[in-house]
Image: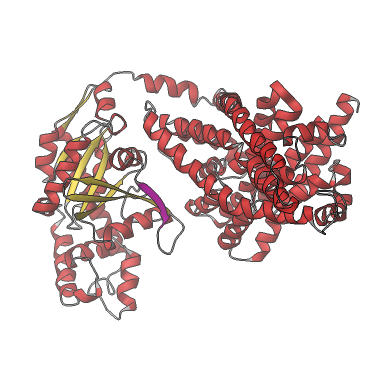
Amino acid sequence: MKDIRILLTGNPNVGKTTLFNSICGVHQHTGNYPGVTVEIKEGKRQINEYSLIVSDLPGTYSLSAFTPDEQVARDALLTSHPDAVVQIIDATNVERNLFLTTQLMEIGIPMVIALNMCDLADEQGISIDAECLEKNLKIPVVRIVARKGEGIDTLIDTIIRVTKEKSSVQSKEIEYPHSVTSHINEIGSFLTSHSSSLGSLSPQYAAIRLMEGDEHLEKMLHDKGLAIPFIDKADPAERDGIAEDILLARYRTAEEITTCSVTCTMGRVMPADLIDQVLTHRIFGIPIFLSCMWFAFQLTFSASNPFLVGIEYVFGYFTELMNNVDMDPFIRSFLSDGVIGGVGSVLVFVPSIFVMFLLLSILEDTGYLARAAFVMDRLMHSVGLHGRSFIPFLIGFGCNVPAIMATRTLQSKADRIITIITIPFMSCAARLPVYVLFAGVFFGAAAGNVIFFLYVLGIAVAILSALIFRRLVFKDEPSPFIMELPPYRRPSGFAAAVHMWFKGREYLKRAGLVIFGGVIVVWALATLPVGVEYGSAESLAGIIGQAFQPIFAPLGFNWQLVVGLIFGFIAKEVVVGSLGTLYGGEEMLESSLAADPTLSPVIALAYMVFVLLYLPCVAALGVIRQEMGNWKWTGIAIGWGILVAYVFAFIILHVGSLVIGA
């Protein structure tokens, strides 16, 4: 089969990922771009004798990259030698999207425009003449509605045709002022004789990028010993003026093309505007956001509960089966207490993880999560956090590792450090099994409310920590926050299911590798030395737990809970796995915890709070060290987390005991 490499690019929130899912379905994977920690999705689709290899690039407004995401998109477009580039354009805002088009056209790669969200444009009274747009751009334009799958087959056929004919290389030329053109031609002629230094860039395009002030390209050429005419001798003010002329020429081109191909019915009040007045209201916005999250956690617990019962029954059956089979006691203990009791106690909460990912995906697809960031900006700014910091916070609800990486979009070093220190307080999905276990055992019907409280507490502690660090350590003002609100969309069940599956699959991979290794280590410690009662205080696990238990005695934690905390450093799911191993036997973990006389609802709540706030997993700490660049701030992040966890768990235990009179 003939491979066709395709790059999907476009502004943020134009539906790139939805289109990617429509083209590739489940035949996709995620990997880090070489040299950075920015993820790129890649998938495949076979059409007759062609194999489409599609890469979903991070969103970017321009090839003048400022953030790691934008740099990855730029580098992929300029250096990965694709057969075609598909730019997804938001049909409700064509002119803004065309600015990126004016840059892409000059690269010289076959190109197709996917005009997405045409249904929303129609609802807003926006009429787009696709034929006129195609004629002016000299680039094929295909109308699509990615979330409904409309126009996808036509788009694929167009991509294949363009790669065969190379027809879109001769796209529209931007009309620059004569003075700019003369400099571009001068530099282009010079670079033509040194084309080996340009890699895959054409001399003409490189000349334009240099005139726009591309410092990355300029440094690359200087490192190769090239003294570039005009660039090295020009007055900085003159260069700024030329760069501004190029910028204005691009905007002018985008405006002219939009004027002749797009018409809009003015004066219409759109339902989205009315909804935004409520959802982003300065007073009601935050309560609405908290209500949405409360509903999501309630639904997570109630919707997944039937699956939990079913999985518990299955693992209980296998445990009983192991106990009734005639085999070596050591092997029986390994299979029953270690594998089934340990890993099984973690896997039983997989349905909760899947439901949570599904709900967050739906909220993101509707466009609401971006509005939540906008709503939280006022509060974030008041405590010294950058409004953009809320985006890593939201990512942190899934996993702290990519959330910490996402702080690279923050330009201020102080903003980055504060955000990285506070992200571990965001309750990642790995902590959810701990909450579901203890809340289900000790709080019954109120379990959803308890889990919601923990997530809100994490946000509150993060904000309080940011306020302390901003007032005491970083006293400068956070930089301003600018973001674009995506249009409201009806969520795609298919896209949400795909997102849920891939996130859930990553969780299952961890359960099969890191978590399995962790619980087996705990089983070995609970079994040794040979001859002691399994999981008793005389076992190695008991000795370790009792050695550290005095530190946690003011919090009411027994030695089994302490062992769970120690091994929870590997991964938070191992907390449950460790307890499942230590409380192994004929009874299920929930029953064993409920029957433990040393535990109570208040102690359970204090334990959940400690798990929420103390050390993140070892992978997250590794990323913190990588992003901080030194051990000083990494140590501060570790120490601050442990201190905050201890203080809040202590307060919860003693205040709670006073309230209930225990």
Q: How many marks?
A: 0
Location of residue 6 in the rendering, given as x and y in whole percent from the top left corner: 25, 51
Tell me if 469 is positioned left or right of 223 in this view.
right
- Residue drawn at x 61%, y 26% is 305
Quadrant location of the C terminus? top right
Quadrant location of the N terminus? bottom left
Magenta segment main secondary structure: strand
- Residue drawn at x 41%, y 19% is 274
Q: Nearer the viewer, residue 188 or 275?
A: 275
Tell me if residue 44 comes above or below residue 529 in the rendering. Answer: above
Tell me if residue 146 comes above or below residue 575 in the rendering. Answer: above
Location of residue 333 in the rendering, given as x and y in whole percent from the top left corner: 73, 49
- Residue drawn at x 65%, y 48% is 339
Q: Nearer the viewer, residue 233 or 657?
A: 657
Region in magenta = 28-32
Tell me if 518 is positioned left or right of 606 in this view.
left
Residue 147 seen in render: yes
Q: Nearer the viewer, residue 298 or 249?
A: 298
Location of residue 97 in the rendering, given as x and y in whole percent from the top left corner: 27, 41
- Residue drawn at x 53%, y 55% is 412
Please identify the residue farthest to the front as the structure is shown.
Answer: 326
State which quadrant residue 342 falls in: top right
